[in-house]
Image: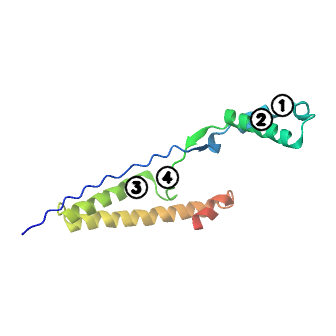
Amino acid sequence: MSYIFNITQTQAIEHNDTRVLDFKRADFNKLRENLGKIPWMKILKGKTTQESWETLKSTIIKAQTNTILLRKKNKKSKKKPAWLHKDLSGKLKEKKDKYKKWKEGHTTKAEYQQIARICKDEVRLAKAQNEQRLATKVKDNKKKFLPTYK
């Protein structure tokens, strides 16, 4: 007697179309210039506090939409470590592939161990170099030093 199981699973792909302000690409000088050209005294004269607030708010939001671009919000974006450079990430991917092939029986354990040893040494070296770079530049930019040890 044998049993056959057929399990099908469909996974819904979540699309995130949320847009947020992209302050890295914002033109703050243009925003200051646009807001500086507005004759605030003429616009707000004779209005109640609530009307003044609504006018101020709508004017600032209008200026903001003209100068600060929007970008899609990406929840899955991960910041990579400062020591992880392109060559090293390629080697780590190669190590991962070798591991999968070794587990499937397509390559030997020695081949996997060789690439694992190389990756281990390179990661250690990259971390040491990053720490050295941080130590030499800490006096110039103290803001970069603290986030590495959070």
Q: Earlier in the sequence, mark 3 or mark 1?
A: 1
Work out how far the residue at label 2 is from the one at label 3, CA to CA, in angstroms: 47 Å
Residue at label 3? Answer: 89
- Tag 2, which secondary structure? helix
Please tell me whether mark 1 or mark 4 is closer to you in this view: 1
Residue at label 4? Answer: 77
Residue at label 1? Answer: 38
Residue situated in front as seen by the camera: 8 or 118: 8
Amino acid type at image mark 2: Thr
Residue situated in front as seen by the camera: 96 or 51: 51
In this view, which residue lies farthest toward the left? 1
* x then y, percent, for residue 76: 47, 53
* x then y, percent, for residue 82: 52, 58
Q: Which mark is residue 59?
A: 2
Amino acid type at image mark 3: Ser
Work out how far the residue at label 3 is from the one at label 1, CA to CA, in angstroms: 51 Å
Question: Position of 31 compared to 102: left or right?
Answer: right
Q: Residue at x 22, y 60 (%)?
A: 101
